[in-house]
Amino acid sequence: MERSIKDSILNNKQYFGEKNYSQKSFLWENMTMGTCYYPEHWSEELWASDLERMKAAGISVIRIAEFAWSKIEPRESEYDFSFFDRFLELCLEKEIKVIFSTPTATPPAWLTEAHPEVLNARIDGVLYRHGSRKHYNYNSPVYQDYCRNIVTQSAMHYGPHPAVIGWQIDNELNCELRDFYSDADDAAFRIFLQEKYETLDALNAAWGNVFWNQTYTDWKEIHLPGLTPGKGVNPHMQLDYYRFIAESTFLFCKMQADILRSYCKPGDFITTNGMFPHIDNHRMTKECLDIYMFDSYPNFAFGLGSNPANEPLNDRWNSKTQNEVRSICPHYGIMEQQSGAGGWTTKMEGPAPRPGQLTLWAMQSVAHGADFISFFRWRTCTFGTEIYWHGILDYDNRDNRKLREVKDFYQKLQTLEPVCNADYVTSFGLLKDYDNVWDMEADIWHNRIASYSDNEIFAGAELSNLPYDVIYLQKDSTLSDLNSYPVLIYPHPVIMSQERADLLTAYVEQGGTLLIGCRSGLKNLNGICEMLPQPGLLHELTGTDIQDFTYASPAEEAVYADWNGTNIPMPVFHDILTPLPGTDVLARYADSYYKGEAALTKHRTGKGRVLHLGSAFSRDTLPMLLKYAGAISPFTELIEADGKDVELTLRRKNERTFLFVLNFQAAEVSYTLLTPMRALYTGEEVSGPQMLPAFGTAVYEVL
């Protein structure tokens, strides 16, 4: 088995790995509205009226076929293209464009029954079975062969069709399952490690395997991270495991992308949708895709997703995720925009969008950089696990308030044509990297601190009208990726490499201001703690030494620092900073046994400076830090508005500036326009005091 898997992986790399056909430049020519449609769910008698009603509502693009393998290959090697042939001809007649999907997210029963080795498994080795979705694994040579075949057959047949304008690969890669424990993955993991480390001595050193007698003497002894007493999985092994999943996902996506590239019509795009764990979305987009798509479900923020508990921002937290999406693809699309209540028969119980929220959430996506909005879905399915995942239309198929709101949104979207392909305007940049993102999962100390700061930075920026970009440091990152941001925050880069430290130093030397927090520079790329003065490789750049540190004690009241007479919170963790010569102390701890010690410092390097905060970031401290660092709100001369009341964003293109004002509250809010603007929805010139209704939106062009 291992030999065939290795051969398969190497064949992928040889045949696909060196190719890079991505156009990297696909942009929507116009603001475009679409929906997700499943012709296999409905009687063919409904197709024509559905497409006509879509067209009347302003929908011009639909996505189809992501779960329809058996409609193309009902039995092994038996192909029937007639179903989608009929549908595509109808789309052509009704002037509806189509994004066709590869159906690899749901392998058919005939395949999983004949070849159970294509299935994913739980950590204890029990196979997942047919009956849901995403039940496959990426590394089965058998599944790879079947996927190549169905993608090739689909692309060859449907690719030339004039109604098809693009392709979606799979559906929501790493959704449902983002960990893989099949026999095929176990064998492929060893291949991945052999290629990375070459020798067992190198691997044993990288993983610190002398600890707890984990030393390996034969490659066959190495398995995927499994069940161990006390959850004591080797964290360095776990970190490589996440890298392995990312590599497997990438190769699976690239295999499909390169097949599609061979049959796409000129100008047709390739995409995939969703943003899920253990994927290097940046590499995947650069090397496989023409445009990246996100699935936007703001209602998850009301307790259905990862929104922090008791958090008043609620559905505004979706903007935090879209900041991440924009780092992958500045002008992205929304493949699934929430239009109704969300829920399965097995999980998730979500409320319906209130009147106005469908438009609000769609405009939230546009405000952050999306130029294509596709609502999920046209009509709620009457059977299956997702009978409570509601679409625009409900089971009865009658016109309703959601359809009326979609039509109204389209009218508004048409007025935003000048905004199409406009850039998002920011006050500062937030640095991240995949090594630290994945280390957070393997290290609860890292996770607790970094997750807290990540949420608080967003909340502080959102409430203070300080928009930001997320920038992922990658192998090919250069100074040009950073120097357009006068202020950068790298909250807790626990893992640090010399290359990144050098890049940060170059950024500061040319005049940038860098803010870092506690627990920085602690580990190398393998997740092993460096025997260096903390913050490790950043030691000289920060001009600080850390000889003592502690979690904030639950036995004490909250700890603060005195910054020029103002007490600033120092949450979660405390690095007690010792300033080196040439480093200024800006704030000192006001509490605990380290009272009077440095809590915030400033160190100049070249033309720039580094601010080192000895704790996690908080929403209260962030605006003070950014103001001191020189970050400027882009709204200061445009609008006077309370960040607690509305979200503000700017998009700019060719010297034209567009202001979005979004009200996420169930009450009317007021604000003041400080300069004349044109309200794009109406064309009216306005200035001065304005009112926005509950869940209302407004978009202005600055005159």
Image (cartoon, rainbow, N blue to C red):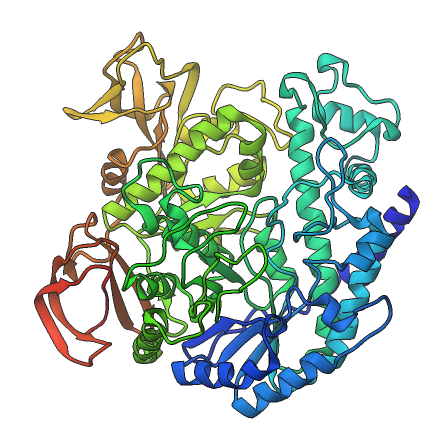
Q: Is residue 149 above or below residue 457?
A: below
Q: Quadrant of residue 681?
A: bottom left
Q: Residue furthest bottom?
A: 93
Q: Position of residue 194 (x, y in %)?
A: 82, 37
The percent position of residue 82, horizontal first and vertical second, equals: 73, 82
- The residue furthest front is 396
Viewport quadrant of the C terminus = bottom left
Quarter of the picture holding the N terminus: top right
Residue 50 in percent (x, y) is at 50, 81
Q: Position of residue 523 (x, y in %)?
A: 57, 27
Q: Is 643 placed left or right of 60 in the picture?
A: left
Above or below, comparing residue 210 to residue 316 in the picture: above
Q: Is residue 158 left or right of residue 551?
A: right
Nearest the eye: 524 or 360: 360
Residue sitting nearer the eye, 496 or 553: 553
Q: Quadrant of residue 101?
A: bottom right
Asked whether, in this view, residue 230 is left or right of residue 493, the answer is right
Residue at the image position 68 percent from the left and 53 percent from the top: 250
**Whether residue 262 can be seen here:** no
